[in-house]
Image (spheres, rainbow, N blue to C red):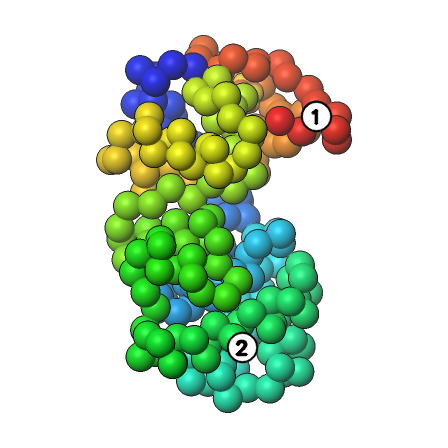
Amino acid sequence: MKVADIPFVNRKLKKHYAEAQHAPVIEFMRVQSGTPFRILVATILSARTKDETTSAVVKHLFSHIATPEDLAAASIENVTEWIFPVGFYRTKAKYLKELAQVLLDQYDGEVPKTVDELCKLPGVGRKTANLVVTAAFNDYGICVDIHVHRICNRLGLLKTKTPHETEMALRECLPKRYWKGWNRFIVAFGQTRCTPRNPNCHDCPLQTVCDRVGVTTTRKQSA
Ligand code: SF4
């Protein structure tokens, strides 16, 4: 795939997204929506966790809390219980408690709006920060998770070794008008067709531009 193919690929990914209503990311996007605080918390919870699990936990957690004040007032034991079984739930409970306090002490209870400010918060890395600026503030960000990293490399658009390299490379080559949709379109595609192992290349809408048509991988070669 070449940079010139981006409009074609985006069009196909967008069409696939509209049809892939069973993709777990679509339910997660619904559950994740709401206040910037809810979007931030949901995104932190989603790290290293399947979207199906995160969606259920976010609903459960937000039946107990709604604001940074509520979260700061809750006990660590309760928060831990409410967010089980997301991955690393004990560590995330600790981060969430710290996050609530930092938001109250340093940001007047509001969620900051830039990637750099968001990255200063407990438990927030670039992936989360980019997703929050896009989903909560309708601003430009490129959230790179394992699906975006894997598929951009499989297609041949990039040759990068880490998600951070992928984000920086996409910031260079992807026209800004595609930034906001790129993550969710590719995640849905990665969950339902271009899966980590044995992707379903048969009839793939990106076959004509993909560098790795027919790829099969083992656990050790997941890219
Ligand atoms: S042709 Fe196969 S490897 Fe390429 S994007 Fe489609 S499913 Fe993924």
- The percent coordinates of residue 90 (x first, y second) are 67, 70
Is residue 17 visible to us here?
A: no
Q: Position of residue 86 (x, y in %)?
A: 64, 62
| Residue 139 visible in this rendered orientation of the protein | yes
Task: Specify whether tag 2 is near ligand 1 (CB below 8 Å).
Answer: no
Element at badge 2? helix
Mark 1 C-beta closer than 8 Å to ligand 1: no
Nearer to us of marks 1 and 2 is 2
Is 180 left or right of 221, judged from the image as shown?
Answer: left
Residue at 52% across, 13% down: 211
Mark 1: give few (<14), some (14-19) or many (20+) Cα within 10 Å.
few
Q: Residue at x 61, y 24 (%)?
A: 200
Pointer 2 local density, CA inside 10 Å: few below 14, some 14–19, many at least 20: many
Image quarter (top left, top right, bottom left or bottom right) of the C terminus: top right
Q: Quadrant of ligand 1?
A: top right
Secondary-structure class at tag 1: helix
User: In the image, which disc is placed on residue 221?
Assistant: 1
Residue type for callout 2:
Lys
> Where does residue 164 sit, x and y in percent of width and height?
48, 38
The residue nearer to you, when weighing 121 against 222, is: 121
**What is the distance, in whole Å, between disc 1 and disc 2 at their CAs?**
37 Å
Instruction: From the viewer's perspective, tell me whether residue 218 is left or right of residue 43.
Output: right
Residue 208's label in the rendered image is: none
Give the image location of residue 69, x and y in percent: 42, 85
Of the numbered discs 1 and 2, the one sitting upstream in the chain is: 2
Residue at 53% over, 72% down: 96
User: Residue at 36% across / 54% down in the picture?
Assistant: 116
Nearest the viewer among 38 and 206 is 38
Residue located beneath label 2 in the image: 97
